[in-house]
Amino acid sequence: MTAAGSASGAGWRGHWPRQLFQAALWGGFAALNLWQFQRYVGLHSGLVLIALMLALGLWAASEALRSLTLRRGWLRLGGTALGWRLAAGVALAASMLQALIALALVGGLQFGWLQMPGGQADYRFGSLLGYWFNTAVLLGAWLAVWVGVVARRQARENELARLRAESARRGLELEALRARLNPHFVFNALNNVRALINEDPPRARDMVTRLSNTLRHALQHSQRDRVRLDEEWAVIEDYLAVEAVHFEQRLRTDLRLDARCAAVELPPMLLQGLVENAVKHGIAVTPGGGLLRVVAEPLAQGVKLVVENPGRLGRSPSPGSGVGLSWLRQRLEERGPPARFDLSQLDSDTVRATLEWPA
């Protein structure tokens, strides 16, 4: 939400509370002027007119400048651009207000409707400049306070938005962690280990090691902002080795890591999320399974990751909206261009996920 949108929607906590504040402020200003007139020169009808018109005029001018500032989006400009626009508005509003007061006062005196001390109004150049300056100072002070209040509220809203985004990101990380620790995956892996203990003890030990590596990486992923691609690749190999025991001949893999992009750093579990998505929505739901192909090749500045798996987009109830892909899109949004992700149907039976990540 922009400052203009926030202020126009709520004002100073709403329209009526702001108007009550305005009434109290300028009403008090009028009362102070009348008290001073009464004490020092006596209360004359012309002075009463000046006090009332000045208070009402400042009220109207402050509201008009506030509305103009919000409508034109000046608060988004900030700095010098905002300052000179407000200063010009204050100068013009003060001039118009003093001109209206002068017309009313001079006309009232001329027709005998008003009385002033000495029988006439003082509109010498120095006095006129003083009237204008006092009006401009009062109006400028009001605008400065209002802009400060809006700016402070906007800063608070921005901070709240940042904290909400951070909270959402952390929540997504926790969801991703829960997904990596999927009880079905762990349950299947442990059952397979138990079956292998008697049949093939060396393979059972290897599977326990690979499962341990996969789970350790999942538990530690939130403690690092970046990992090397070759580190992530090792975890992918461990994960697929564990899944290969479960899916047996249904899972065939083709992993190709170009050595030139091994040192590229990327957010942890970015590639693993794509691979797990391919297993869950491709291999697991395709009769007979198929080939899971993972390729990493260098770009001019970065790496291109391609994951292909059997399947068809639209086969799952919510394709492309799982935790893994949500996590990936969150990272893409944070990184911005030239990071790019595409999920497409390569042919009638193959889905391709392509991720381009800048170094």
Image: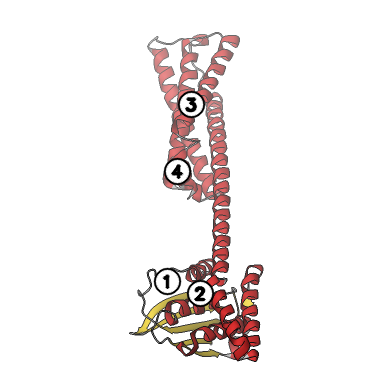
> Where is 174 relative to 127, above or below?
below
Distance CA(mark 2)–CA(mark 3):
52 Å
Depth check, front residue: 230 or 357: 230
Locate residue 350: give its quadrant: bottom left
The single residue placed furthest to the front in the displayed view is 198
Query: Horizontal and vertical percent for residue 13?
Result: 50, 36
Distance CA(mark 4)–CA(mark 1):
40 Å
Q: At numbered mark 2, what does the secondary structure look like: helix, strand or loop? A: loop
Q: At numbered mark 4, what does the secondary structure look like: helix, strand or loop? A: helix
The residue singled out by tag 3 in the image is: 20
Q: Residues within 10 Å of mark 2 (few under 14, many from 20)?
A: some
Give amino acid for label 1.
Gly
Depth check, front residue: 154 or 318: 318
Q: Earlier in the sequence, mark 2 or mark 4?
A: 4
Q: Residues within 10 Å of mark 3 (few under 14, many from 20)?
A: few
Q: At numbered mark 3, what does the secondary structure look like: helix, strand or loop? A: helix
Location of the C terminus (image quadrant) = bottom right
Distance CA(mark 2)–CA(mark 4):
36 Å
The residue singled out by tag 1 in the image is: 320
Q: Earlier in the sequence, mark 4 or mark 1?
A: 4
Depth check, front residue: 167 or 58: 167
Depth check, front residue: 267 or 321: 321
Give amino acid for label 3.
Leu
Q: At numbered mark 1, what does the secondary structure look like: helix, strand or loop? A: loop
Q: Closer to the observer: label 3 or label 1? A: 1
Residue at 54% from the left image edge and 49% from the top image edge: 78
Q: Residues within 10 Å of mark 1 (few under 14, many from 20)?
A: some
Residue at 58% from the left image edge and 68% from the top image edge: 177
Distance CA(mark 4)–CA(mark 3):
20 Å
Indicate how the structure is coloured in the image.
Answer: secondary structure
The residue singled out by tag 2 in the image is: 339
